[in-house]
């Protein structure tokens, strides 16, 4: 089924339904959500769909197609994309030379986005090894309503509308985003022939522009050199992916046919391939099939009673994205005698075309004999629909009521990256999720999918990932997260799970009785870091929740409160003197002065020279009496405190990078401390300074308690315990975020300034502007 005749003619203004989509401002999230959220994409403009109408979340940080196009049309200029320039850096394929970038209108005087609509036969592969993408795009043309979501109908070369700018929509780990590009495309040295994907018609450019947008989506054209079709199908639909091995399904022909027929009826996308040749080249077999090459399955069809009343022939229509005559040459191929057994009416009903276009038919038994892998993408509940048979894609789709639950998370070393179940000591560190199958839903079908995020965009190899599902009771879940003892005693509670494989997504189907279940997603080896998305598809409502500690305020460790009364110590006298030394005439201290005090009194290391201090110290005229008083206080402090000896540090000044990081940390710490107590004011008074000093002193005391070897640093594994002693019960989501803050500063260990930043961020996230717990947090310190 193609899109021929479905699009508006070039040059015709858009109807009211095709005018500029709605735009909504970004909604500010709570501080907890901002702080606790895992990594999200900031590269592209988010877009949501309601009844297939896009709504864009406007942001000054993202390119907006409609705003940029309006600017170009008003200025009578063609768009040039600064984020994906027409240079070798955007190709990232060193072996290619002599590349010329030409606009589509320079390649063809009659350039059009579509020529007679879009068809599966339009797509032809070029010099880039991205057959996996083109296979997915071929499948997309069979779903007009979904095709229009990815390729908006307002892309045009028509006079008055063309500004050299185009846009596409891709699904990125739970949300749709808009990717904006210009129409400058890589060509050979002559400037007349496209290097990469192209249409069979030289005047049509939708497939080449889609490929360019996808290259920008992942950074470069070179990033598309090799992949799996299910990855691309997912990026174009947001669906759930699975794969099967037809050669290993001997004797299960009925099962495989049910997968193909049932998936086809529900709008699923299919691709298939043969194992790669040892040389890595697309070597053709004697049957005309290419090894290591991705094919799309564009139709399944049954011919009944061909050899007898009870006999049926099961056929698959398959397409090679090369779009040439490299095709299957066995039974039911273009030139096979089997077609002669069908009358013209049956050939017409099948839609048979016998041309050298890369498309061919194949019987199911031969498919199972030759193809090593079948890749399937089931449409998500939002899109899970199938067109009425015989409607030509023009009728409203049927809706299948699937339910989707999704949560994202992270594997962070020493925190949530515990490895697979064979690592008994660390496996319980992995994130945990509960699934509740309600009573009355015995035999509920569930598909669980685990997807790792950002690996291709970051040019990183895929991790080996998987998950295990346990049957649990409410008693098992009393302690959150479930402790190590459960996993040591309950091997028999495992009810299923995925294989562990280095794929972007792994999944499994389970039939679950009513009750509670625990899902443990993990990498294969401990300590491997990455982001992931966990999704569950069910035919009935099923609840997915994180099984983690409750994020809340706790109580101070008794060992901290036993350290004495802070305000009766010479340490406080030094801090008070510093306040009066830097406060203005109204006894108010600004953020810069507070940064100076915290740096000098808490964070400054012995090997740091004065010129490296993060904040500029302001010179003040002081009386001889005040100087004498300050010296006496400092002398008392020397006898009061026994400084711990630190590990030998590298001689010399801190690097510029380290200084900048510490300056940023100080500014953030002061910002959070002041915002909590200053009621919107930019300065703080004496009583407010007392509160700040008490907070930081308490956190320093906790830090020294856990710095058992006197190194001046904490091990990453101690952070959760230290925060608990400071009165913060944190969950994995917050803890991962805190450790990311440390990692962003290239620290192998946690220094005092890092810990104070973690404590202030943690309190800010938990409190979210609620100050009612202050007395609880600082009990026995007044």
Image: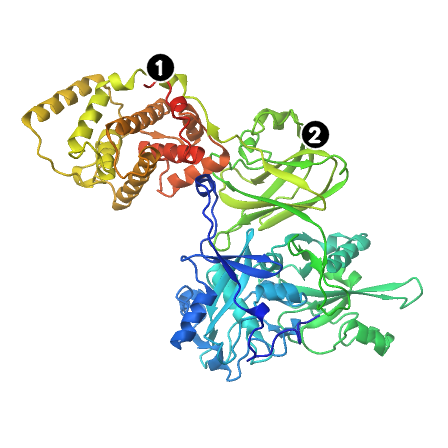
Which residue shows up at 77% across the image and 75% down it? 352
State which quarter of the image contains the N terminus.
bottom right
State which quarter of the image contains the C terminus.
top left
Q: Which percent across, then down, holds residue 237?
A: 61, 58
In the image: residue 439, left or right of residue 576: right
In the image: residue 362, left or right of residue 505: right
Scheme of image coloration = rainbow
Is 341 situated above or below 213? below
Q: Which percent across, then down, holds residue 644?
A: 27, 23
Q: Mark 1 or 2 closer to N-term?
A: 2
- Checking the image for residue 107, the label placed there is none
Residue 127 visible in image: no
Per the image, the residue denoted by label 1 is: 562
Q: Nearer the viewer, residue 274 or 168?
A: 168
Which residue shows up at 79% across the image and 57% down it? 257
Residue at the bottom extreme of this rendering: 109
Per the image, the residue denoted by label 2 is: 492
Q: Nearer the viewer, residue 782 or 491?
A: 782
Q: Quadrant of residue 726?
A: top left
Q: Which percent across, then down, holds residue 522?
A: 57, 40
In the image: residue 30, left or right of residue 112: left
């Amino acid at each position: 089924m193609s899109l021929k005749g479905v699009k508006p003619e070039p040059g015709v203004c858009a109807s009211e339904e095709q005018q500029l989509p709605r735009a909504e401002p970004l909604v500010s999230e709570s501080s907890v959500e901002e702080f606790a959220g895992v990594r999200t994409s900031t590269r592209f403009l988010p877009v949501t769909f309601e009844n297939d109408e896009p709504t864009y979340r406007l942001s000054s940080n993202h390119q907006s197609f409609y705003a940029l196009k309006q600017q170009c049309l008003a200025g009578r200029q063609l768009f040039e994309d600064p984020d994906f320039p027409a240079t070798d850096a955007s190709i990232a394929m060193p072996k290619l030379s002599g590349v010329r970038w030409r606009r589509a209108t320079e390649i063809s005087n009659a350039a059009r986005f579509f020529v007679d609509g879009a068809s599966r036969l339009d797509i032809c592969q070029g010099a880039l090894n991205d057959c996996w993408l083109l296979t997915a795009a071929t499948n997309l043309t069979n779903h007009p309503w979904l095709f229009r979501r990815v390729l908006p109908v307002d892309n045009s070369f028509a006079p008055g509308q063309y500004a050299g700018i185009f846009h596409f929509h891709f699904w990125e780990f739970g949300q749709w985003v808009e990717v904006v590009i210009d129409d400058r495309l890589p060509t050979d040295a002559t400037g007349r022939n496209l290097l990469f994907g192209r249409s069979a018609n030289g005047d049509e450019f939708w497939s080449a522009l889609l490929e360019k947008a996808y290259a920008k989506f992942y950074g470069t054209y070179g990033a598309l050199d090799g992949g799996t079709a299910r990855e691309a199908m997912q990026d174009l639909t947001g669906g759930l992916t699975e794969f099967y091995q037809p050669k290993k399904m001997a004797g299960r022909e009925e099962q495989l046919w049910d997968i193909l027929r049932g998936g086809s009826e529900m709008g699923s996308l299919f691709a298939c391939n043969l194992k790669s040749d040892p040389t890595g080249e697309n070597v053709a077999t004697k049957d005309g099939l290419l090894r290591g090459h991705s094919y799309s399955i564009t139709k399944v069809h049954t011919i009944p009673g061909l050899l007898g009343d009870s006999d049926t022939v099961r056929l698959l229509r398959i397409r090679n994205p090369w779009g040439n005559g490299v095709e299957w040459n066995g039974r039911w191929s273009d030139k096979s005698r089997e077609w002669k057994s069908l009358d013209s009416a049956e050939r017409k009903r099948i839609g048979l075309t016998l041309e050298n276009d890369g498309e061919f038919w194949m019987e199911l038994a031969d498919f199972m004999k030759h193809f090593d892998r079948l890749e399937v993408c089931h449409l998500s509940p939002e899109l899970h629909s199938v067109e009425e048979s015989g409607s030509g894609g023009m009728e409203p789709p049927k809706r299948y009521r699937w339910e989707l639950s999704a949560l994202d998370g992270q594997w962070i070393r020493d925190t949530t990256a515990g490895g697979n179940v064979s690592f008994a000591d660390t496996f319980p560190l992995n994130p945990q999720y509960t699934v509740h199958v309600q009573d009355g839903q015995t035999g509920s079908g569930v598909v669980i999918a685990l997807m790792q995020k950002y690996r291709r965009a970051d040019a990183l190899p895929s991790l080996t990932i998987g998950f295990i599902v346990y049957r649990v009771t409410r008693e098992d879940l009393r302690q959150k997260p479930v402790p190590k003892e459960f996993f040591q005693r309950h091997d028999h509670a495992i009810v299923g799970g995925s294989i562990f494989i280095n794929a972007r997504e792994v999944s499994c189907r389970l039939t679950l009785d009513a009750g509670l279940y625990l899902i443990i997603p993990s990498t294969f080896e401990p300590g491997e870091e990455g982001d992931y998305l966990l999704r569950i598809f069910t035919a009935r409502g099923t609840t997915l929740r994180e099984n983690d500690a409750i994020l809340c305020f706790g109580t101070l460790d008794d060992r901290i409160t036993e350290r004495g009364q802070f305000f009766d110590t010479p340490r406080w006298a030094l801090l008070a003197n510093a306040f009066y030394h830097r406060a203005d005439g109204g006894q108010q201290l600004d953020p810069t002065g507070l940064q100076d005090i915290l740096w000098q009194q808490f964070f400054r290391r012995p090997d740091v020279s004065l010129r490296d201090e993060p904040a500029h110290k302001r010179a003040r005229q002081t009386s001889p009496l005040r100087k004498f008083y300050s010296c006496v206080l400092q002398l008392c402090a020397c006898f009061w405190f026994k400084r711990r000896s630190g590990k030998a540090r590298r001689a010399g000044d801190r690097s510029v990078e380290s200084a900048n990081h510490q300056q940023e940390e100080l500014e953030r710490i002061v910002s959070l401390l002041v915002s909590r107590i200053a009621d919107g004011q930019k300065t703080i008074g004496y009583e407010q300074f007392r509160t700040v000093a008490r907070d930081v002193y308490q956190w320093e005391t906790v830090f020294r308690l856990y710095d058992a070897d006197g190194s001046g640093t904490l091990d990453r594994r101690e952070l959760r315990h230290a925060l608990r002693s400071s009165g913060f019960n944190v969950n994995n989501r917050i803890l991962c975020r805190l450790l990311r803050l440390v990692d962003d500063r290239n620290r192998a260990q946690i220094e005092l300034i890092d810990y104070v930043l973690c404590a202030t961020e943690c309190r800010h996230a938990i409190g979210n502007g609620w100050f009612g717990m202050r007395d609880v947090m600082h009990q026995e310190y007044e």
